[in-house]
Image (cartoon, rainbow, N blue to C red):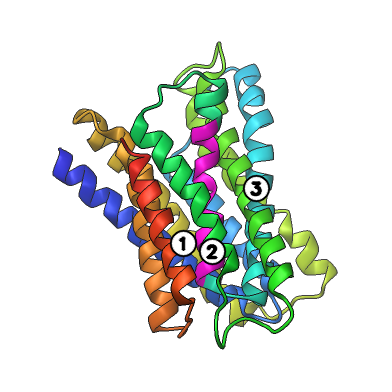
Amino acid sequence: MLFSGISLTLLTGLLWSAIGMVYSRAAEKKEGFYTFLFFSSLFFATTSWSVTTPAVVPWNEILRIAAVMIPAGMAGQLGFLALREAMRRGSHGIGWCIAQAAMVCPFAVGILFWEEPSSAFRLSGMALLLGSLVPLACSRNNGTEVPGTHRAFLVCAFLAFLLLGLQQTLTLVPNRLSGISGAALGWRVPLLSLCGINWIGMALYRHEWAWREILPLAFLYGVLVAAGQWTLFLAVDCLSGAEAAGIAYPLAVGSSIVLFFLYTRVVRRERSGRLGMVGILLAVTGIFLLAF
């Protein structure tokens, strides 16, 4: 059970790194990005509603969950939009790592406001993860950073950090609402999947008609997002049987950061220097410590 759970978690990390790669390619497109966001969300929503049809539950429970998950989904959509703006101005690898470091937010909120148990490992992990943002912010990337845009890159990257941190924190709220049944929790992902469909308005407003170029990327992105959600839940189920469910998310995020960073160095030829390497190492170490 433990071996299967860890294998599925590493597969999730691989899928999430692939999501970053596809998003990186889409972010470089001068036209059709909002079309990409719309169609990838449409594919994700179609998959979510067809594979896991939510159970019939009282409307008041659905509305209470929607009141949390819809804002969470919108924060996530805006967070990835901010990440795209960061990627247009600087290193894709550093921007992705800063955004993924947002996982420290739900851990901090849980300890500070929800009285979740903390340990020396978790507190050290949070400190390392937050500390990694300093060398990451100070690193420069030869050949990939647009001259004169480092400050704008940092603003966009840290805005993505805040928005994705808000999303991840809000997605944990339904589990803590009183009077919410287990069946009603099955509405979380389907409701979340609906939040990107409204990008069709921006695509039409900007007259983005280059669908043939963007559709393959959007389809692949939507499939990867759905597959990543599926493998993550399977991993959590397996690890729960071995009383190790806490390692699933940190291990998946940590491995996705490492794999995506290797992609940016080998394929995109990004060079983040020593500060970038130190920041990545601190972030990954901190994320793994959060599992204990």
Asked which secondary structure carries label 2, the reply is helix
Q: Is residue 232 visible in this depiction of the protein?
A: no
Residue drawn at x 26%, y 49% is 8
- Residue 90 position in % (x across, y down): 62, 75
- Disc 3 crowd rating (10 Å Cα; few below 14, some 14-19, many 20+) is many
Q: Earlier in the sequence, mark 1 or mark 2?
A: 2
Q: Are marks 3 and 1 in contact (CB under 8 Å)?
A: no
SS assignment for the magenta stretch, majority: helix
> What amino acid is labelled 3 in the image?
Leu
Which residue bears the numbered disc 2?
136
Q: Earlier in the sequence, mark 2 or mark 3?
A: 2
290 displayed left or right of 206: left
Which residue bears the numbered disc 1?
279
Q: Specify the label residue 162 is tagged with.
A: 3
- Disc 2 crowd rating (10 Å Cα; few below 14, some 14-19, many 20+) is many
> What amino acid is labelled 1 in the image?
Gly
Residue segment shown in magenta: 93-108
Residue drawn at x 53%, y 20% is 114
Q: Is 100 part of what is drawn in magenta? A: yes
